[in-house]
Image: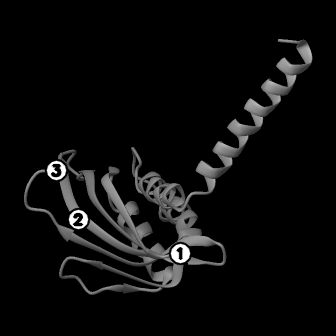
Amino acid sequence: MSPRNARIGALLAFLAVVAAACWWWTRPERQIRAILDDVAAALTYDRGESGLQALAAVAALEKHLAPLISVQTGDAPSIEGRDAVITAGARWRARTPAMRVRFLDPRITFSDDRTATLVASAEALVWTGTGEQRVDRRRVTATITRAADRWVVSIARASPVSEPLP
C-alpha cells in the first residue's frame, strides 16, 4: 500500500469514528440517561450543607425540568412547577446529613420523536441525624418531552417498591 493510500485510509477511518461519535452523542436515549445522571449527582452528597449550598446544587437541574413539571411521590400531594420542585429538592437535601442516589435499570420508550416514557428503579441511601443509614427504594416513572431542542422532564412519579432491587 502506498503512503498516499494509507493516509486516505486513515482519514476515512478517522471520519467514520467522528461520525459514529456524533451519532452516539446526539441519540435521545443518551440525552435522557444524562438527565438521570445529573439528578443522581445533584442529590448525592457526603455532608450536610447550608440551604444556599443545597439550593445551588439542585438548581443545576433547572435545565432538565419543564416549567410546568408535576412530581408525585407516594401519597403526598404533588409538587407543581419547576421552582417548587427545585425548592423541595433543596429542602430535602439541606435537612439530610448525607445521601447517595442511583438509578437502576432505566428503560426508555418513545411515543413519537418528542415524547418518551422512562421507567427506572431508584435507590437512595440516606444517613439520618443519628448517623444511621436508611435505604429508600422507589419505582420512578417519568414523561420526558422534547422542548426547544432539548429533553425535559414533564411528569415524574415515584412509588414505593416492596421487594429489594437488584
Compare marks 2 and 3 and give the one earlier in the sequence.
Answer: 2
**Picture quadrant of residue 149:** bottom right
Which residue type does callout 3 highlight?
Leu
Q: How many marks do you count on the picture?
A: 3
Classify residue 70 as left or right of residue 135.
right
Q: Looking at the image, is mark 3 or mark 1 nearer the viewer? A: 1
Is label 2 in contact with label 1 (beta carbons under 8 Å)? no
Q: Circle 1 sits in a helix, a strand or a loop, which is it?
A: loop
- Disc marking residue 139: 2
The answer to whether residue 95 is left or right of residue 113 is left
Check residue 164 in the rendering and tell me which mark sits there, or answer none: none
Residue at 46 percent across and 56 percent down: it is: 33
Amino acid carrying label 1: it is Asp
Type of amino acid under label 2: Arg
Q: To which residue does mark 3 refer? A: 165
Element assignment for label 3 = loop
